[in-house]
Image: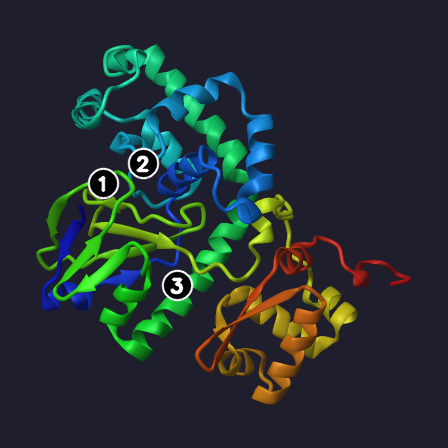
Amino acid sequence: MVYRIHFTVDDLARTRVSPLSLPLMELSAAVRTLQQRGHAVRFGAWRCRALAELRPEARMVLDLIRTRRWAPDFLTRAESGSPDEVLERVRATPRSQVRSDLADVAAEGPLPSWAHHLADDRDLFRRLCDSLDHMYSVLLSPHWQQITSNATAEGGMRTRQALAGGMEHLLASANPRRVRWNAPVLEVTMASGLDGDLLLEGRGLLLVPSYFGPQWSAVCTAAQPQPVLTYPAHSPWDTRSIIAPSPKPAQHGTPPSALAALLGPTRAAVLTSIAAHPGCSTKELALLAGVAPPNASQHATTLRRAGLVHTDRYRNTALHTLTALGTTLVDCPHGPSDSPHG
């Protein structure tokens, strides 16, 4: 069984790739991945650490967001904004929507007994929201900076893919194991086994990368202004950042003089240009840093060997982004120029 998304010419014209991750959809993917055993190299250490840190209150979310099961939309909806903003909106979900979303889930399978009272028991609903906050703090918060940085680079790469091969090529290659382009229909094999049809009716589709959804795609039909389809992020930049927590960002950026003293002015300009434009090509990097393309390539190679930059290749184009270590260096509040003996 497949879920069929029907396109018109207008839909193809309005389909785009998001440069951002969506907190609730990414969190629901992480909750499901936590309950699985696959992809041990990428997620094994993350699972062990998360399971050790989760408190008993996490059980409420685990009961409602299950592997290969439909979950309530108010817990997984495709909403943009910071994680704090989106989690706060969940707390403001109207009772009527909670009741409707739970009814949709119950139509596909049994609910936990306690969940039948969610719409009418505000204290119980508050405890569920506390459970969701706790899951985010353990599963995603340590990695959110790197996820958002990678999403920007992913968006740039996929946009270039669409320009080079057309929108149909982008749709066909986003998740080839689970998504098939059979013009004018995109056929999506869902983990839940959902069978149905979605008419885009000129709205187009928003493609959103998912780092904790390495296999399946998810669909949010109620998203505004257009429905959302997630796909496994290419994520070549630094998959180790999913295994180990990303460094916490500093409150103030490193003064340019500090980076220049450490790396030299040209190499510092290359590094900060990549920080400001993740996923940029070598040609774009040369323009941003004000150097010739061969020099930009040489400096990017040096920074890559130092572990500050990761370079991915799409066809004949090199795309550069910072690693977690490079991000830490750019965000560091103190540099060598701050010391009189530096």
Left or right, 189 with reference to 28: left
Furthest residue in direction right, as rendered:
341
Residue for badge 1 = 193
Q: Residues within 10 Å of mark 3 (few under 14, many from 20)?
A: many
Q: Is residue 222 above or below residue 199?
A: above
What residue is rendered at 91% in x and 62% in y? 341
Q: Is residue 330 above or below residue 281?
A: above
Residue for badge 3 = 155
Distance of mark 2 from mark 3, alpha carbons?
Answer: 27 Å
Q: Residues within 10 Å of mark 2 (few under 14, many from 20)?
A: few
Label 1 is placed on what type of residue? Gly
Left or right, 128 with reference to 43: left
Residue for badge 2 = 68
Instruction: Say if mark 2 contacts mark 1, CB within 8 Å.
Output: yes
Residue nearest the observer in this picture, 52 or 301? 52
Which of discs 1 and 3 lies nearer the camera? The answer is 1
Label 2 is placed on what type of residue? Arg
Q: Position of residue 312 (x, y in %)?
A: 52, 70
The image quadrant that residue 51 belongs to is top right
Sequence-wise first label, 2 or 3: 2
Left or right, 319 with reference to 342: left
Q: Residues within 10 Å of mark 1 (few under 14, many from 20)?
A: some
Distance of mark 2 from mark 1, alpha carbons?
Answer: 8 Å
What residue is rendered at 63% in x and 76% in y? 300
